[in-house]
Image (cartoon, helix red, strand yellow):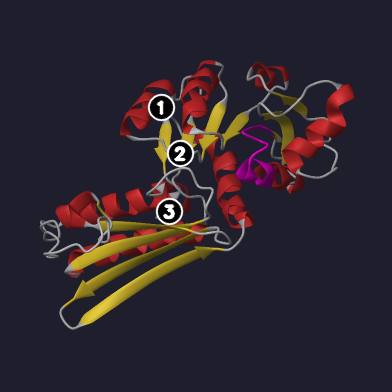
Amino acid sequence: MTPVIRVGVVGGAGRMGREVCRAVRAAPDLVLAAVIDPRGASGAADAADAGDAVLGDADPLDGAVVSGELGALVDARTDVAVDFSTADAARGALPWCAAQGIHAVVGTTGLGADDMEMLARCFTGEPANAVVAANFAIGAVLLMRLSELAAPHMGGAEVIELHHDNKRDAPSGTAMRTAERIAAARAAVGADAFGPDPTAELVLDGARGAAGPGGVRIHSVRLPGLVAHQEVLFGALGQSLTIRHDSYDRASFMPGVLLAVRAVRDRPGLTVGLEPLLGL
């Protein structure tokens, strides 16, 4: 019988954190051991308020420790911490988890190349591992892979990412990662970066988006009612190709999160992206 995995959620009162808490509680092989968030509270007297802050309803937390302090992860004997907090908070929490021997699954946005280098130094497999992904929706992972396949054969590419109006960062981590992979796929076969933007006159500054890796332009849309959406538009002589992914509900990210939770203990060191877990 597979041992039950004890999961702690860092940033558990946020939108994604709440969804992770629900998904973990619904999985038969996982236990929600701890929820860490400044809005959380510890102690039986605060259990009702803590449950409301974390889950947005009156659902019981089934014995999970709810706290604003990372130390509760140790108290709850956490095996894997899922971090959907903020970049600033994650920069402190993740090295702490590594030092405590707690594996990490990281979906926090806003982490850059320097952060990845730091995580690679912290999570070496002794004593803990980590999986970091720009996007846990399996459809978004497939979009990035398909974009890699198309990139060497097309003459230009632009990325349009669309998110809810409360998203902190722009462009999204998924958009940046997509552009990086398009550029790398072209370089791998000896193809040049896409040519410079030929636009001669900008009526409005920023109308052509931002210049991303490899000459890929990136455009960010922020509107109420959206969740997470991305289009990659390729153009070539006499033709175009559009690849699009839509997440209509945060539940779409949960299969990927749970996949990483179950796999991280057996993947030494730092794993970036879900691709290795999916065999892509």
Vertical order, 149 against 176 (above or below): below
Q: Is residue 71 left or right of residue 193?
A: right
User: Mark 3 is on which residue type?
Assistant: Gly
Q: Nearer the viewer, residue 156 or 123?
A: 156
Spatial separation of the CA atoms under disc 1 and disc 2: 9 Å
Residue drawn at the location 37% of the way across and 22% of the way down: 121
Residue drawn at the location 32% of the way across and 61% of the way down: 159
Q: Position of residue 129 (x, y in %)?
A: 48, 29
Q: In which quadrant of the rendered view does residue 202 lie?
A: bottom left
Q: Nearer the viewer, residue 95 or 212?
A: 212
Q: Earlier in the sequence, mark 1 or mark 2?
A: 1
Spatial separation of the CA atoms under disc 3 and disc 2: 16 Å
User: Mark 1 highlights which residue?
Assistant: 119
Where does the magenta region start and end? 6-19
User: Mark 3 highlights which residue?
Assistant: 279
Neighbours of disc 1 within 10 Å: few (<14), some (14-19), many (20+) = many
Q: In which quadrant of the rendered view does residue 151 lie?
A: bottom left
Mark 2, secondary structure of its residue: strand
Task: Find residue 132 and name its label.
Answer: 2
Mark 1 touches mark 2? (CB < 8 Å) = yes
Q: Earlier in the sequence, mark 3 or mark 1?
A: 1
Q: Hey, which residue is sitting farthest right in the picture?
A: 45
User: Mark 1 is on which residue type?
Assistant: Leu
Mark 1, secondary structure of its residue: helix
Nearest to viewer (mark 3 / mark 1):
1
Q: Is residue 111 left or right of residue 194?
A: right
User: Mark 2 is on which residue type?
Assistant: Val
Vertical order, 270 against 195 (above or below): above
